[in-house]
Every structure is written in C-alpha cells, then in structure tokens.
Amino acid sequence: MLWLAMGGVAALMARDICLHYNQIAGTDLTAPQMARICLSVYLGPLTGPIANPGANDWPLAWRWATPLLAIQVSSLGPFLISGKPVHPVLAVIAWLVFAGASGLWFFGALLSLGLFLM
C-alpha cells in the first residue's frame, strides 16, 4: 500500500513535469502520452526512456534501476524467506529500508523523466 501511495504522488508530479515541459518545449505531449508517462513511474528510472524513446539510452536507465530494485527486493527478504514470524526489530528495520528504497525508486523515476525530457 505504501508503494502504491508513493507511486501515486510520483505520478502526480510526473503530470506536472509533463505540463511544464509542454509550456517550455513548445511541443505538446498528448493526454494519452502523459497518462503513459504517469503510469510508467512505477517502473522507476525506466520512466525516462519511456517518455522519450528517441533518447535511446536504455542502458543508463537500467544501471540506475538494477541496484534500486535489488535493494527493494532484499528489504522484503526477511518476510519472504522466513517461514515463521519475523522479530519485531528486524521487521521495523526491513520496512524502513523498503520505504527508503521506494522513495529512491520514485525519485529515480522523476529524475530520469527530467533528464530524458531535456
């Protein structure tokens, strides 16, 4: 639920970035294009190449996305690997790491969007 909420906030910010881009660049991102970009924030740093496929720099986006995704998945490890209840202290630490990694994931999406729309 936290991940979806953070993504929703990032999607709203991406919409504002797209509207600002339309004013400055003089080109118009259509409503379907903006919707695709807003939904792509859930793909993290891969948002930039989706927003501007002409930039053709998928390797850069994957270099950002891979470590961030690894951190997110590893923070859920204690819950996924252990078949028994997790110690409360470990659970709190894992959720804090997950929340931080999620914040970085969506920040990476917005940073990627800004970089690829320049």
Image (cartoon, rainbow, N blue to C red):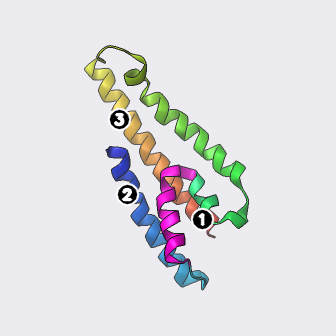
Rounded to the nearest angstrom, the CA distance separating label 3 from label 1 is 30 Å
Q: Given the image, on which type of amino acid does mark 3 rest?
A: Leu
- Residue 8 disc label: 2
SS class, disc 1: helix
Q: Residues within 10 Å of mark 2 (few under 14, many from 20)?
A: some
Specify whether 58 is left or right of 68: right
Q: Nearer the viewer, residue 85 or 103?
A: 85
Q: Which residues are magenta?
A: 29-45
Locate residue 63, reporting x and y percent: 66, 44
- First in sequence: mark 3 or mark 1? 1
Residue at 33% over, 22% down: 90
Q: Mark 3 and mark 1 in contact? Answer it, CB < 8 Å.
A: no
SS class, disc 3: helix
- First in sequence: mark 2 or mark 1? 2
Residue at 44% over, 72% down: 16
Q: Which residue matches tag 1?
A: 51
Q: Given the image, on which type of amino acid does mark 2 rest?
A: Gly
- First in sequence: mark 3 or mark 2? 2
Q: Given the image, on which type of amino acid does mark 1 rest?
A: Ala
Q: Nearer the viewer, residue 54 or 13?
A: 54
